[in-house]
Structure formats: structure tokens, C-alpha cells
Image (tube, helix red, strand yellow):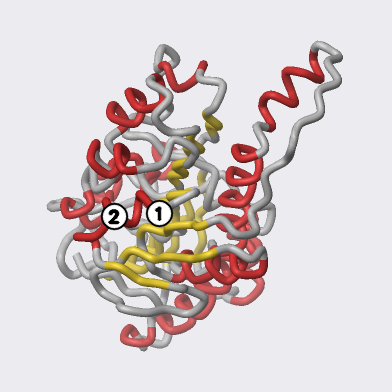
Amino acid sequence: MAVKLLVLDMNAEQYRDSLSRKFPDVEIHAVHHAPEADKVISEVDVIVGLGHHLPKEMLAAARSLRWVQALTTGTETLTAPGVLRPEVILTSTRGIHGPQMTELAFLNMIALARDFRRMQRNQAQAIWEQRGQPILEGKTIVIVGLGLLAEHLAERCKMFGMTTVGISDGRTKGPFLDDVLPRKRLVEAAGRADFLVLLVPYSPATHNLINRDVIAAMKPTAFLINLARGGVLDQDALIEHLQAGKIAGAGLDVFPTQPLPKDNPLWTMPNVIITPNIGGRSDRFVEQTLTVLEPNLAAYKEGRLKDLRNIIAH
């Protein structure tokens, strides 16, 4: 099958070069920004890129499009009504983000618990302050959402001697989890958490899942970490509880509006760590995503569409 493939990504040339070596007969166009694809968009039958970076207008102009390979786990911007034609196959790179997401979760847990920002302020002022340092051993992590990312994180948490609790309506047990509770018991679980970590996909059912009641149930010594999507957390309620000192702090990688507006009070809170939606990225990201993209492209070329990994219904 003749294939014309468009890669839209900051690392587009790396994808093109790697794929060209294994698939020399595939016509590959590499661009960094959507307008750069205007001349070829009507001809390509495959588009590869981060789901939230693929504009609806570009996808609509891709009249020959048969398959979209998202370089993300989340695909909510692509499954929204009217974005993709029904006949277009959508796949994700689910399963490759475990290492970087787990490390970001640990960065937040350790930095928040030990108040690393305070250490940085002390260093800037040459202040020598010794304090007792909290450890993760014996702490309880409540993970909202029990996919592959949660399993990867829970396994590492057990190595640190933590108690692991999962929240899911689809599962009653899981590897490396001491307990699994349904969403209807989320408020109860939040009250047990030293760290409430969000890894749940965004959908209408999870919009503001972490609401005022859930946050109010958290201990004043507990931390909230959102590595999922901004829409799963009631950000206004979080800000109110942080300002009132009702929870100890937060680590936030995602927000309802991105970039986070400069006048948002979260920027200046001393007990908040902000990262710019980098949880899924790594210095090996291209290599990681190729483990899904390459076998999928081989299956697509050979017409084995049912063998495509991580097919997403839309």
C-alpha cells in the first residue's frame, strides 16, 4: 500500500529519519507547525502528532486521511464530536509514558513533603536551616485512575514502603495496590491520603471529579498532585483551600487554561510546584513512541488494520 504520512511535531525530523530507514517506500513529510502542511494535507492518509497539537481545521482538510497516530495517551481533543470522520482510525501511544510520569510524581511528592522551595529560598539568602525531613515510607498515596500509568507508579511507591490505594469504577484490585475503591468512595479515600495523585483520563464523566468536597476531605498535611488533565480538578476550589491553609500544597502539571495565565494566584504560592504540561515528555520520547508507531505503521501498510495497537473509539 502506498502511504503518504505527515508528522507534525517539534521532533518531526527525528521521526522522519527513523521511519525512513525502516519504511523507505513511505512518503514522509515533517513539519513543526500546522500551516507548513498546507500544500500536502489533502494528499496524506496518515497523520502523526500530539493529539492536542492537531488542529480541527487541518484534520478537516485532510481529505485522504485514514489513520491518526496520536503521540499521547489522552485523545480527548480528537474524540470530540466532529473532529474526525467516522472512518478515520485513531490510535494512541498508551503504555509508553510510565517512566517520566512516575518520576514527575516522585519529584512532586519529595519536593513538596520536604519543602524544597523553602530550601531554595534559604540558599538564595545563604540561610543555614536544619529541619526534620519527612520520608515517603509509611505514607499513603491515593491514585485516582487505574491505568498503566497508575500501575507503574504504584509499583515504585511500594519500593519506598508506601501504602497504595487506587480509585476506579472499572477495577476492584490491581498489582501493587493495597486497596481499590470505587469513585463513590473518593471523599473517604481523600481523607486517607498523604498524597492524592490524579492520573484519570478527562471526559464529561471526570470533569471536576476532584471537587470542593474531595479537597475539603483532605488532611491539612496532605498534598494534591495533578498529572492528568486540568479539567478533572476544580481549580478554583483548590486555590481557596490552599489560600486558607486547609491542605499542605500542590504539584500541578496541567491546567484548565494553558498556558496558565500570568495573573493566576497559583504562580506565587510558596507551597505550589508548577510544571508546564511536561509529564508525558522525556529525553527519550521519540524512541519511546516509535515502539508503538513503527509496528502500527507496518500493520497499516500491510492492511492489517485490526492489528493496530491502542485503537481509540470515537
Q: Nearer the viewer, residue 285 or 125?
A: 125
Instruction: Tell me the quadrant of the picture where the C terminus can be found.
Output: bottom left
Question: Pointers 1 and 2 in contact (CB under 8 A)?
Answer: yes
Residue pictured at 30% horizontal, 37% vertical: 216
Classify mark 1: residues with Cα within 10 Å, few (<14), some (14-19) or many (20+): some
Q: Position of residue 33 (x, y in %)?
A: 46, 38
Residue type pointed to by label 2: Glu
Residue named by callout 2 = 188
Q: Is residue 307 above or below residue 203?
A: below
User: Which residue is nearer to you in this view: 4 or 78?
Assistant: 78
What residue is at 30 percent from the left and 68 percent from the top? 181
- Horizontal side of 259 relative to 99 (left or right) equals left
Q: Quadrant of the N terminus?
A: bottom left
Q: Is residue 57 left or right of residue 27?
A: left
Tag count: 2
* Residue 57 in sight: no
Q: Quadrant of residue 220?
A: top left
**Can the viewer see residue 182?**
yes
Label drawn at residue 104: none
Estimate how packed mark 2 is, as few (under 14), some (14 to 19) or many (20 or more) residues with alpha carbons within 10 Å: some
Does residue 112 sit above or below 181 in this rendering? above
What kind of residue is marked 1?
Arg
Residue 59: percent from left, percent from top: 27, 50
CA–CA distance between discs 1 and 2?
7 Å
Image coordinates of residue 241 in percent, x first then y, are 35, 27
Q: Is residue 191 left or right of residue 140?
A: left
Q: Position of residue 236 (x, y in %)?
A: 28, 26
Residue located 52% across and 76% down the image = 176
Q: Identify residue for label 1.
A: 192
Residue at coordinates 51% horizontally, 48% vertically from top-left? 9
Judging from the image, what secondary structure is the residue with disc 1 in?
helix
SS state under label 2: helix
